[in-house]
Image (spheres, rainbow, N blue to C red):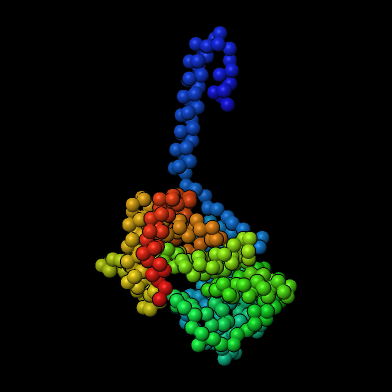
C-alpha cells in the first residue's frame, strides 16, 4: 500500500520523493523482519477445539496447569488396588475446591466388565448396566467434590473386545453383554438428573462406536461425543484404519482424546539407557508387566529410529511424538501424564514449541519409519 502510493506521486519531485520512498521502504521492511522474528521467538499459544457434537471447548492437552480439561477414572491410580482405588479422584477433588467449577471441564470414567468387585458395594461382577453406572457416578461425584461431571466415558466395553495391545478379535471369547440401548438409557437418567453433561467411550472399536450412535439415533438417546483410545507413533493402525472414518466430523463427529501419546514414556528415549541412574523409578520398571508392549524389543527398535528423526530435524523426542499426535485431524485433545513437574512442563512446552504443523519433511521421515515398524507395540 505504501509503495503504490509513492508510485502515484508526480515525477516533478521525483528525486526527493524517490529517496524518501526508499528510506520509508527500508524502515517498513525492517519492521516486518523484526515482527517476524518476535513471532518466531514468542511461544505459540495452546489451541482449543470443540468436542464432537457437544458445546465443550476443550484445550488440545488434557491434564495440567493452564489447561481446561482434567481426566480421571474411578479405578485410578494405576495399578488398581482396593486400598488405593479412588485416590486420584480425591486429589483432584481437593484441588477442585479452590477452583471456579465452570472453568474446569471434568472428565472421568466408569469401569467396564471386570472382576474387580472392590469397585462396587455389592457385586459379583462389575458391568455397564444401570445399577453399576449409577453407583459409580454417585461415588465419583463425592470423591471429586462436585455435583456434576462434564464428560463421562465408559472406560472399556461391557462386551469382549481385544484390549491393550491384543492384535486380533478372538471369537471364542464372545460373551453376552449389556445391550447398547440399555447402557445409553442408564446414562440418559444421569443426564436428566443433571449429574452428567456428555458421554463418551474408551478403548472402543468401530463396531462399538457405530452401535452406540445407531442406538442413540433410533431411540432418541444421548449420543457419544468422544472416544478415548491409545494413539501414538507406536500405536496408529487401530484408529487410522477405520475409526478415523467413523469419527470424521461429516460422519459420526466424535473427537479423539488420545492417551499414551508418548507410549508410556518410551518415546522419550529414557528406557533405551539401562544405565540411567534413576531408571528404577520409571513407571514400567516400577510395575513389571504394566504396558510392557511399549517396551518390547520391536518397539524399542522403532523408538530408536524416531529419535533419529527428531535429532535430524532439531526436535526433542517429546516434541516429535506429541507434535505428531497434536496435528492429526481427528485429535481433539491429547492426554498427557507426568510424575514430576519437570515432565509436565516439558510436555506442555512441546505442544507450543514444536512447529505447527510439523513440516512435510518431518512427516515424510515419520512415514518412512512407520512403513518399517507398523504398530510395534501391538502384540
Q: What residue is shown at x 47% (from left), y 78% (from top)? A: 168
Quadrant position of the C terminus in the picture:
bottom left
- Furthest toward the bottom, the residue is 124
Q: What residue is shown at x 49% (from left), y 35% (from top)? A: 35
Give the percent coordinates (x, y) of residue 352.
Answer: 47, 51
Q: What residue is shown at x 50% (from left), y 56% (from top)? A: 327
Give the percent coordinates (x, y) of residue 9.
Answer: 58, 15
Give the percent coordinates (x, y) of residue 125.
Answer: 56, 88
Examine the image and state in which quarter residue 211 appears: bottom right
Q: What residue is shown at x 49% (from left), y 70% (from top)? A: 238
Regarding residue 103, the answer to whether it shows in the image is no
Choose between 84 and 329: the one closer to the eye: 329
Give the percent coordinates (x, y) of residue 166.
Answer: 45, 78
Regarding residue 279, the answer to whether it shows in the image is yes
Examine the image and state in which quarter residue 306 appears: bottom left
- Furthest toward the left, the residue is 275
**Image: 117 above or below 110:** below
- Residue 314 vs residue 6: left or right? left
Amino acid at each position: 500500500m505504501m509503495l503504490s502510493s509513492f508510485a502515484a506521486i508526480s515525477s516533478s519531485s521525483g528525486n526527493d520523493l524517490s529517496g524518501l520512498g526508499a528510506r520509508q521502504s527500508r524502515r517498513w521492511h525492517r519492521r516486518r523482519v523484526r515482527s517476524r522474528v518476535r513471532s518466531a521467538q514468542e511461544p505459540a499459544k495452546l489451541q482449543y477445539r470443540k468436542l464432537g457434537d457437544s458445546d465443550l471447548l476443550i484445550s488440545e492437552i488434557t491434564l495440567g496447569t493452564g489447561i481446561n480439561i482434567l481426566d480421571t477414572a474411578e479405578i485410578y491410580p494405576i495399578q488398581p488396588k482396593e486400598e488405593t482405588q479412588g485416590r486420584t479422584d480425591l486429589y483432584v477433588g481437593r484441588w477442585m475446591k479452590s477452583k471456579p467449577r465452570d472453568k474446569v471441564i471434568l472428565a472421568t470414567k466408569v469401569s467396564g466388565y471386570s472382576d474387580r468387585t472392590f469397585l462396587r458395594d455389592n457385586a459379583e461382577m462389575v458391568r455397564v448396566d444401570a445399577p453399576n453406572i449409577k453407583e459409580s457416578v454417585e461415588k465419583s461425584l463425592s470423591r471429586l467434590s462436585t455435583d456434576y461431571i462434564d464428560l463421562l466415558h465408559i472406560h472399556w466395553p461391557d462386551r469382549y473386545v481385544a484390549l491393550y495391545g491384543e492384535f486380533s478379535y478372538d471369537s471364542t471369547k464372545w460373551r453376552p453383554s449389556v445391550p447398547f440401548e440399555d447402557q445409553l438409557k442408564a446414562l440418559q437418567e444421569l443426564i436428566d438428573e443433571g449429574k452428567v453433561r456428555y458421554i463418551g467411550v474408551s478403548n472402543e472399536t468401530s463396531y462399538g462406536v457405530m452401535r452406540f450412535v445407531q442406538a442413540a439415533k433410533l431411540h432418541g438417546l444421548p449420543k457419544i461425543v468422544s472416544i478415548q483410545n491409545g494413539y501414538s507413533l507406536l500405536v496408529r493402525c487401530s484408529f487410522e484404519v477405520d475409526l478415523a472414518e467413523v469419527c470424521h466430523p461429516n460422519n459420526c463427529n466424535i473427537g479423539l482424546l488420545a492417551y499414551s501419546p508418548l507410549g508410556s514414556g518410551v518415546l522419550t528415549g529414557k528406557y533405551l539407557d539401562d544405565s540411567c541412574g534413576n531408571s528404577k523409578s520409571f513407571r514400567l520398571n516400577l510395575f513389571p508387566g504394566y504396558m510392557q508392549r511399549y517396551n518390547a524389543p520391536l518397539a524399542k527398535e522403532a523408538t530408536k529410529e524416531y529419535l533419529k528423526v527428531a535429532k535430524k530435524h532439531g526436535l526433542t523426542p517429546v516434541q516429535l511424538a506429541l507434535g505428531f499426535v497434536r496435528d492429526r485431524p481427528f485429535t481433539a485433545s491429547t492426554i498427557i501424564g507426568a510424575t514430576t513437574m519437570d515432565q509436565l512442563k516439558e510436555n506442555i512446552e512441546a505442544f507450543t514449541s514444536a512447529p505447527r504443523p510439523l513440516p512435510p519433511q518431518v512427516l515424510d521421515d515419520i512415514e518412512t519409519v512407520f512403513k518399517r515398524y507398523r504398530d510395534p507395540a501391538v502384540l
